[in-house]
Amino acid sequence: MNLHNQTPAKTSSSAPWIIAVGAVTFALGAVGAFTLSQMNQSRQNDAIAVLAAQLAEMQVTRAQSPALLAIAAPSDVAVPATAAIPSASAVLAARTPTAPAVELSQEDKVAEAIAIVNRNKMRMLTEGVVAGLYSVTAENADGGSRIALNSRNAASTAAELENLLAKAAANGDIEVPDSIATSDGTVDSQTLLFDLVQRSLQGGTAKEVAAAQEMRSRAFAASAAKTDVVEGKRYYTVQSGDSLAYISLQFYGSTNAYETIFEANRAKVASPDKIQIGQRLLIPEA
Amino acid sequence: MFSRKFAAAIAVSAGIATSLMAQTDGELINAAFTVGGVEGRFTQSQTLNTALIETFHQPMENCGAVCIAPNTVSADIQTVSEREVIAFVASTVSAGNGLLIDSREPEKRAAGYISASVNVPTSLVQPENPYLSDIMLALGARSFEGTLNFSDAMPLIIFDDGPTTLDAPALITQLLGQGYPADKISYYRGGMLVWTALGLNTEDAKS
């Protein structure tokens, strides 16, 4: 499904189980307070900005335009089979105080319920991060140690969201930014989760900005990545499962510094999704 | 007899540290290393320099009735012997991947030190030192927005004057407090006192 799908009817009919990730992203936007200017800047960026732009777009267009990023619900959060596809935009519109009142259909009510649940999940996770109720650890996975976000107030929620993102990405229901494409062609949903949480915090309140910094600090400290320093320059060798965003997370504590690495390695990396296992990337000093 | 022992001289280079361990049994130590482009050699003599040994006997101050350093600094810090120190210098330090650290004050170090060691006085590695993070970076840590990451930090063996002093345990405690991984730190408890008592060679400020 195309992210830029502006047609609610098509959205409604193209997938049997749609939950309004628009609602999730609405929550993201609400928590993170994306501004219009941020959105425009995001759009100018390529790759990693795709996701942010989509989220931001939601905020601006939701009142007048039905553009909605919808993703298929995995079976474990599937709605009852009798529920037809709701117009998620209608749900959102109905929840927006300034929007005209919309008579909700049964389907819409189901969708709204799901939307609320997802919105609350994301909010719970993000609020937990703001409250410091999480840890970032390096966990042993296939082929080495990987950074993971461990939520203390919403552990199952984080896992569920990660799962949801992975399925949505696998189904092509959301467009994964190039920078999150891994060296072996898979989708790194854990990095996507970091990306979402960090985006939801940036440009927010002072408390949220501080939380974002704390999260960068924890992610940076947790990384088990090893580097070589040659003539004062730091190099990292791409491992299986790495994406540019994940490498950025390891050396700068956040996914969005991927461009720094990309720019420093333009000579050997054609685009952010084109890093290869074994490639030596220059990691500029922050 | 003398020549037979020295006939067993082994030039140790990176990667054959294990063979050093095996071949020095029953023989005096004679192991070459190259650190920072400078060649050096660990040798062992049967004639002891008792005056030097005495300078390394530093009664601890305010340590109560018994002034003996603990055998272990903490549960996850390995305590090592001279053999490990020599093998570590010959392999890891020679390859540029580790440091043998003398935790004593420079004045004490001037009397004599183990070849290839570098001086990082315990008094420098204190939270009050504004340049503390620079020291951590020198040990291989990475820094971002004031946070340290120790994935690239070098393995260290830390010593002091020996079992009658606590400089090394104190330095190890400070490093652990900064987040330095315990599995990258070893404690050479014997220090200068035991090193010289075993007839192992030292360098001093004059040499």
Image (cartoon, coloured by chain):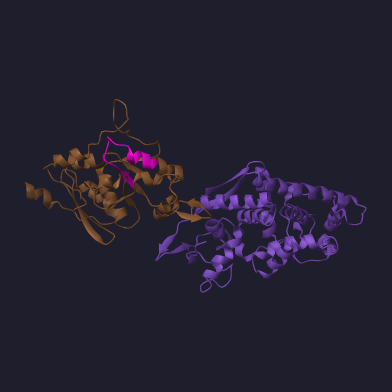
Chain colours: A purple, B brown
Quadrant of res B183: top left
Q: Is B164 above or below relative to B140? A: above
Tell me, yes or no, if residue B106 can be seen here: yes
Taking depth in this image into account, of A80 and B24 the one nearest to the observer is B24
Q: Is residue B181 left or right of residue B13?
A: right
Q: Is residue A6 left or right of residue B198?
A: right
Q: Residues in magenta? A: B157-172
Total residue callouts: 0
Q: In which quadrant of the rendered image does the C terminus of chain B lie?
A: bottom left
The percent coordinates of residue A135 (x first, y second) are: 58, 45
Q: Is B41 above or below relative to B162? A: below
Tell me, yes or no, if residue A279 can be seen here: no
The percent coordinates of residue B49 (x first, y second) are: 14, 42
Taking depth in this image into account, of B201 and A69 the one nearest to the observer is B201
Q: Is residue B74 magenta?
A: no
**Residue at far left of view:** B1
Q: Is residue B163 magenta?
A: yes
Residue shown at the point (22%, 59%) measured from the top left: B39
Taking depth in this image into account, of A145 and A249 the one nearest to the observer is A249
Q: Is residue A185 left or right of residue B33?
A: right
Residue shown at the point (37%, 39%) measured from the top left: B170
The percent coordinates of residue B117 (x first, y second) are: 28, 51
Quadrant of res B138: bottom left
Taking depth in this image into account, of B17 and B145 the one nearest to the observer is B145
Residue shown at the point (63%, 54%) measured from the top left: A194
The percent coordinates of residue A236 (x first, y second) are: 47, 62
